[in-house]
Image: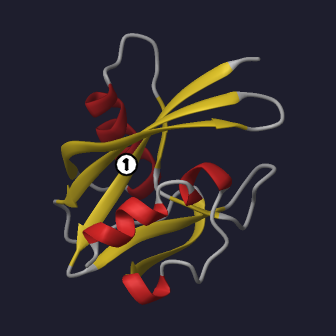
């Protein structure tokens, strides 16, 4: 099975977490943490900064690794490195997503998460306490 390595930004602000709704592909309409594939020759931090620039037209500061999620989708294995991040930009612009939201601890489970992203929600819930 093919393995895809990705990075995800766990962006925290004022007791909420930033989530985006996919605007394309098999999981269109599902929610995820922004990020994307690590390209050849890139480190995870570099990849995450590049992906957030591409997806949100924004700048972030990448902090500690929260967790690496391993998940088997039907056609591939996903390795997702999830980093706690801080938004440096005053605004964002959705390039690839249909919607975005700042979710509080009480709202965390109110959206339909991608399976791999759902796997880290318990840790994120503790961050929002």
Looking at the image, residue 72 lies above or below residue 114:
above
Furthest residue in direction bottom, as rendered: 106
Q: Quadrant of the N terminus?
A: top right
Looking at the image, residue 110 lies above or below residue 43:
below
**Residue 88, located in which quarter of the rendered image?**
bottom left
Q: Residue at x 24, y 81 (%)?
A: 15
Looking at the image, residue 4 lies above or below residue 126:
above
- In this view of the protein, which residue sits in the foreground, 20 or 98? 20
Q: Residue at x 29, y 40 (%)?
A: 49
Specify whether residue 41 is in view: yes
Label 1 sits on a secondary structure element that is helix
Residue 124 is situated, as x and y percent measured from the top left of the image, at: 37, 64
Q: Residue at x 22, y 52 (%)?
A: 60
Query: Which residue corresponds to mark 1?
Result: 52
Residue 95 is situated, as x and y percent measured from the top left of the image, at: 52, 58
Tell me: 90 left or right of 74.
Answer: left
């Amino acid at each position: 099975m093919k393995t895809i390595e990705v990075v995800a930004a766990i962006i925290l602000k004022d007791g909420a977490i930033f989530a985006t709704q996919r605007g394309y592909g098999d999981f269109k309409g599902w929610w995820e943490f922004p990020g994307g594939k690590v390209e050849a020759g890139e480190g995870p931090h570099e990849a995450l900064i590049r992906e957030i620039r591409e997806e949100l037209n924004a700048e972030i500061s990448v902090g500690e690794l929260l967790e690496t999620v391993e998940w088997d989708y039907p056609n591939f294995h996903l390795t997702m490195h999830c980093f706690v991040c801080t938004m440096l930009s005053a605004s964002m612009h959705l390039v690839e997503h249909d919607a975005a939201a700042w979710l509080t601890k009480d709202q965390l489970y109110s959206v339909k998460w991608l399976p791999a992203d759902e796997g880290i929600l318990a840790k994120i819930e503790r961050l929002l306490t």
